[in-house]
Image (spheres, coloured by chain):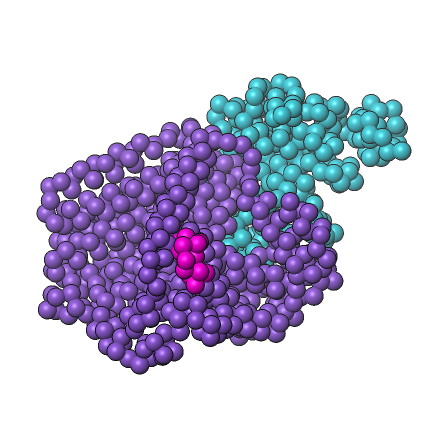
Chain colours: A cyan, B purple
C-alpha cells in the first residue's frame, strides 16, 4: 500500500514551447496540496496529464501506485478532475447530470441517487434539482460540477481554480466541502491564484514556474527557504517566482 | 478596402454600421488561413458549379433575348407560382435570421449599449437579412439577366427588383412575426415556435407539390386535382393580362406600374416595420438575454437513476436531443418531407413504381436523420473532457451514443412506413431493412469519422468534418435507397448498390486509436 496519492517523475510536455519540463512531484495521501504558479507556469497542463486528458511526452505518473500512463482506466477510477470551466450540460438538470456522471464511473444507481441528494443538499442546490443548468449562475454551475466530481467518492480530487467567480458564501461552502473530504481520507490538489486560500487551507504548497517545481513544502518551510520569516505566502511566492511588483 | 469604406462613412449612421458589419462578416467567412487538399478540391468543385450556372445562364439569356416574354394566363401562372415558391423559401430563412438577430449576441450588446439609435441597429440587421435571404437567387439569375439585357432585353433587369422586393417583404414579415411571437408567448417559447414555423414554411411548397400525388385520379392518366385546378385558373380573369395576378409577369417585362407597385410594396413594408419596431427590437433583444436565466423546470427530477454506462449515456443523449430547439426545428423539416411520402406510400402501396420510388426516398431520409442525430451525439459532445477523464471504454460509449441516435430515427421512419406495413407487409419489411442499413451506415460513419465541433455548427445548417466524408455518407444513403428500390422491384441487381454502399461505409473505417487521437 503506497502512502503517495500522486507520484510524478520526469514529466515533460511541449506545445510550441515546454509547458512542463522534467517535473517531479509527490503528493501524499490524505493531504490538501496547493499547486501555485504564475499564468502559463504549467499547473493546468500537469493536472490534465494526470487526468488523462493530455498525453505526456515523457515521464511517469502514478496514482495510488497505479501507472496512469499504461493503465489510464484504472487510474481514472480513483480520480476526479474539476477544471475552471465546469464540464456541464446546459440542458440537463443537476440530478440528470449526476445520474450521467455516476453512470460514467459505474456507481450503482441506488447509491448514486442517495449521494446525489446528499451532495446537492450540502451545496444548497437541492431546491434547484429540477432546473436546467443553463439558467444557473457561474457559482451554481461550479457547485453542480463539484457535486459531479464527488459522486463517485474519488480518492484523488484535482481542482483547477475552484473558487474563481464564486461569491463569499459559495466559496466558503466549497472550501468546507474540500476540507470535509480531506478529513474523510481523500487527497485534494488544487491550483489557485488566491494565495490566502492556499495559505489557510493547504497542508503543503508547491510552486511551479516554466514547467518546473521551484519550491515545495509547508508554509513555514517555504518561508525558511525564501528567508522571509513571518512573511505572507504572497511575499514568499513573489520572491520565489522573481516577480517584479515595483 | 472595406476598412477604408468604414472610415469614410459618418460614424453612427446606418451606412457606417452596415459597412462595419459587412467587414466582420467577410473576416468571419475568410476563416483560417492555409491551403489543404480538401480546400483545393472544394474550390475546384465550386468553380465548376459557378461555371455551370454562368454557362446555363448565358445560354438561357441568349434564348430569352430572341423573343419577348409573352403575357398570357399560363406565363402569369408560372411566374406567380415561382414567386410563391421563392417567397416561402425566403420567408423561412428570414424567420430563422430574425430569431438569430434577437437571440445571438455577437456584437449586439455592444451596439445596443452604444448611443446608436435602436432603429439604426434594426435597419442594418434587417438589411442583412434581406441580403442573405436573396443573395443566392440574385447570383443564380445574374448571368441570365446580364446576357439578356446586353443582347437587347434590358427589361429582364426588373427580375432583380422583384427578387429584392420579395426578400424585403419576407424580411419584414419575418421580423414582424418573430417580434409578435415575442410579445405573445415570451422569449423562451418564441425561439422554438419561430423556428418550427420557419421549418414548416420552408417545407410548405413540398407539401403543396405532394398535393398532386394526394389528388391523383385513379384513372392512371396522370391527371390530378392540382392540374385540373391549374387548367381552370388559366381561364380566370384574375390571370388575364389585365388581371391582378398577371402583375408579376408584367413587372418582369418592365411594365412601369406593376414594377413600381411590386418594388414599392417591398420597400414600404420594410421601412414601416423597421421604423416602427426599432425601439421594441432593443427591448426584445434585452429580454432575450434573460431567456436562459428563466429556470426551465423538468419533471421527474426525483426519479430513480439509470444503472450502468449504456443506460445513463442513452438517457442523457435522448434528453439533450429532445431539448435542442434548433435540432427539433430541423428534424421537423425532415418530418415534413417524410410524412407526405408515408401517406402517398400508404395510398399507393400496390400502384406500380410509386412505392418503389418513395421507399427509396424514405430509406435515404432515414440515413439522413441517423447521420444528423449521430453527428450531434458523437461529434458535438458538449463535455468531451468529462468523457475523456472518465474510466470508460470509449468504444462502449460510442456504441451507446449510436443507440441513442438510432432510437429517434427508427421512431420517425417507423411512422412513415407504418401505414405501408399494413397494406403491404412484405414490402414494408424490405423498406425497414433498407432504413436500418442506411441508418446504421450513417451512424457508423459518424463514429469512425468523428470530429469535435459545437452544436452551433449544426444549428447553422452545416456539419463539421470533411466535406468528402459528408458526400460519401450521402452516396451511401443513396446506395441503400437504390438497393431498396431495386429489391422492391424484384431485381437481383439490388445486391450491387447494397454492396457498394457497404464497401463505401467500410472504407471510412478508422481504428479507435486513430479517431480519438485526432
Tell me which secondary structure the magenta stretch mostly adopts: helix
The x, y position of residue B475, in whole percent, is 29, 42
User: Is B152 inside the magenta-drawn segment?
Assistant: yes
User: Can you see residue B149?
Assistant: yes
Q: Nearer the viewer, residue B207 or A110?
A: B207
Query: What residue is drawn where x is 65% and y is 23%?
Result: A18
Residue A34, quarter of the rendered image: top right
**B151 displayed left or right of B225:** right
Q: Nearer the viewer, residue B109 or B95?
A: B95
Query: What residue is drawn where x is 75% and y is 26%?
Result: A217
Placement of A118 over or under A65, stated as above or below: below
Query: What residue is drawn where x is 32% and y is 61%?
Result: B67
Q: Nearer the viewer, residue A155 or B107?
A: B107
User: Can you see residue B293?
Assistant: no
The x, y position of residue A143, in whole percent, is 62, 50
Q: Nearer the viewer, residue B422 or B60?
A: B60
Query: What residue is drawn where x is 48% and y is 40%?
Result: B452
Number of marks in picture: 0
The x, y position of residue B203, in whole percent, is 36, 62
Hey, which residue is sitting farthest bottom in the picture?
A: B237
Residue range of the region highlighted in magenta in the rendering: B144-157
Placement of A204 over or under B245, stated as above or below: above
The x, y position of residue B226, in whole percent, is 24, 71
User: Is B413 inside the magenta-drawn segment?
Assistant: no
Q: Quadrant of the C terminus of chain A?
A: top right
Placement of A226 over or under B269, stated as above or below: above
Amino acid at each position: 500500500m503506497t502512502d503517495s496519492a500522486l507520484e510524478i517523475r520526469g514529466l515533460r510536455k511541449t506545445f510550441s514551447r515546454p509547458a512542463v519540463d522534467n517535473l517531479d512531484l509527490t503528493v501524499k495521501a490524505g493531504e490538501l496540496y496547493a499547486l501555485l504558479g504564475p499564468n502559463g507556469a504549467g499547473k493546468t497542463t500537469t493536472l490534465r496529464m494526470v487526468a488523462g486528458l493530455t498525453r505526456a511526452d515523457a515521464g511517469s505518473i502514478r496514482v495510488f501506485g497505479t501507472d496512469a500512463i499504461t493503465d489510464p482506466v484504472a487510474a481514472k477510477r480513483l480520480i476526479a478532475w474539476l477544471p475552471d470551466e465546469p464540464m456541464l450540460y446546459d440542458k440537463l438538470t443537476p440530478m440528470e447530470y449526476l445520474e450521467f456522471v455516476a453512470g460514467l464511473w459505474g456507481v450503482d444507481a441506488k447509491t448514486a441517487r442517495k449521494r446525489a441528494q446528499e451532495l446537492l443538499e450540502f451545496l444548497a442546490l437541492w431546491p434547484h434539482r429540477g432546473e436546467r443548468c443553463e439558467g444557473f449562475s457561474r457559482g451554481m454551475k461550479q457547485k453542480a460540477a463539484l457535486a459531479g466530481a464527488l459522486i463517485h467518492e474519488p480518492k484523488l480530487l484535482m481542482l483547477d481554480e475552484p473558487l474563481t467567480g464564486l461569491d463569499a458564501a459559495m466559496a466558503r461552502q466549497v472550501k468546507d466541502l474540500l476540507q470535509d473530504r480531506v478529513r474523510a481520507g481523500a487527497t485534494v490538489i488544487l491550483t489557485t491564484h488566491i494565495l490566502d486560500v492556499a495559505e489557510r487551507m493547504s497542508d503543503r504548497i508547491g510552486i511551479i514556474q516554466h514547467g518546473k517545481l521551484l519550491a515545495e513544502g509547508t508554509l513555514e518551510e517555504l518561508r525558511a527557504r525564501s528567508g522571509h520569516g513571518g512573511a505572507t505566502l504572497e511575499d514568499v511566492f513573489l520572491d520565489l517566482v522573481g516577480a517584479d511588483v515595483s | 478596402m472595406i476598412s477604408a469604406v468604414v472610415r469614410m462613412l459618418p460614424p453612427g449612421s446606418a451606412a457606417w454600421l452596415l459597412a462595419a458589419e459587412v467587414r466582420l462578416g467577410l473576416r468571419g467567412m475568410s476563416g483560417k488561413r492555409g491551403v489543404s487538399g480538401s480546400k483545393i478540391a472544394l474550390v475546384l468543385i465550386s468553380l465548376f458549379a459557378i461555371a455551370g450556372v454562368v454557362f446555363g445562364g448565358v445560354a438561357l439569356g441568349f434564348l430569352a433575348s430572341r423573343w419577348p416574354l409573352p403575357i398570357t394566363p399560363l406565363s402569369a401562372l408560372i411566374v406567380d407560382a415561382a414567386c410563391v415558391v421563392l417567397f416561402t423559401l425566403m420567408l423561412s430563412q428570414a424567420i430563422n435570421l430574425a430569431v438569430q438577430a434577437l437571440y445571438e449576441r455577437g456584437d449586439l450588446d455592444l451596439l445596443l449599449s452604444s448611443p446608436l439609435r435602436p432603429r439604426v441597429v434594426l435597419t442594418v440587421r434587417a438589411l442583412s437579412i434581406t441580403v442573405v435571404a436573396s443573395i443566392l437567387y440574385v447570383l443564380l439569375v445574374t448571368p441570365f439577366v446580364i446576357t439578356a439585357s446586353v443582347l437587347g432585353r434590358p427589361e429582364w433587369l426588373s427580375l432583380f427588383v422583384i427578387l429584392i422586393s420579395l426578400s424585403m417583404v419576407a424580411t419584414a414579415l419575418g421580423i414582424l412575426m418573430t417580434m409578435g411571437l415575442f410579445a405573445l408567448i415570451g422569449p423562451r417559447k418564441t425561439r422554438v415556435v419561430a423556428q418550427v414555423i420557419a421549418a414548416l414554411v420552408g417545407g410548405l411548397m413540398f407539401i403543396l407539390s405532394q398535393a398532386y400525388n394526394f389528388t391523383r385520379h385513379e384513372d392512371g392518366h396522370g391527371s390530378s386535382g392540382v392540374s385540373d385546378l391549374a387548367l381552370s385558373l388559366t381561364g380566370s380573369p384574375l390571370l388575364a393580362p389585365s388581371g391582378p395576378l398577371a402583375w408579376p409577369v408584367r413587372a418582369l417585362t418592365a411594365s412601369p406600374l406593376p414594377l413600381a407597385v411590386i418594388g414599392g410594396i417591398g420597400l414600404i413594408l420594410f421601412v414601416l416595420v423597421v421604423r416602427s419596431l426599432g425601439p421594441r427590437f432593443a427591448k426584445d433583444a434585452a429580454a432575450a438575454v434573460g431567456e436562459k436565466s428563466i429556470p426551465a423546470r423538468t419533471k421527474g427530477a426525483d426519479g430513480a437513476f439509470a444503472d450502468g454506462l449504456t443506460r445513463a449515456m442513452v438517457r442523457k443523449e435522448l434528453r439533450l436531443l429532445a431539448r435542442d430547439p434548433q435540432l427539433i426545428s430541423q428534424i421537423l423539416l425532415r418530418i415534413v418531407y417524410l410524412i407526405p411520402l408515408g401517406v402517398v406510400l400508404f395510398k399507393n402501396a400496390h400502384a406500380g413504381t410509386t412505392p418503389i420510388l418513395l421507399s427509396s426516398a424514405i430509406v435515404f431520409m432515414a440515413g439522413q436523420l441517423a447521420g444528423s442525430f449521430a453527428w450531434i451525439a458523437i461529434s458535438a459532445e458538449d463535455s468531451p473532457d468529462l468523457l475523456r477523464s472518465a474510466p470508460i471504454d470509449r468504444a462502449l460509449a460510442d456504441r451507446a451514443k449510436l443507440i441513442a441516435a438510432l432510437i429517434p430515427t427508427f421512431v420517425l421512419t417507423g411512422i412513415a412506413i407504418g401505414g405501408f406495413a399494413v397494406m403491404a407487409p412484405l414490402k414494408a419489411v424490405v423498406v425497414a431493412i433498407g432504413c436500418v442499413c442506411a441508418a446504421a451506415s450513417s451512424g457508423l460513419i459518424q463514429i469512425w469519422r468523428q470530429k469535435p465541433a459545437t452544436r452551433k455548427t449544426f444549428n447553422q445548417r452545416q456539419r463539421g468534418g470533411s466535406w468528402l466524408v459528408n458526400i460519401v455518407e450521402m452516396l451511401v444513403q443513396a446506395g441503400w435507397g437504390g438497393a431498396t428500390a431495386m429489391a422492391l422491384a424484384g431485381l437481383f441487381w439490388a445486391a450491387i448498390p447494397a454492396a457498394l454502399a457497404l464497401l463505401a461505409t467500410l472504407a471510412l473505417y478508422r481504428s479507435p486509436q486513430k479517431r480519438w487521437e485526432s
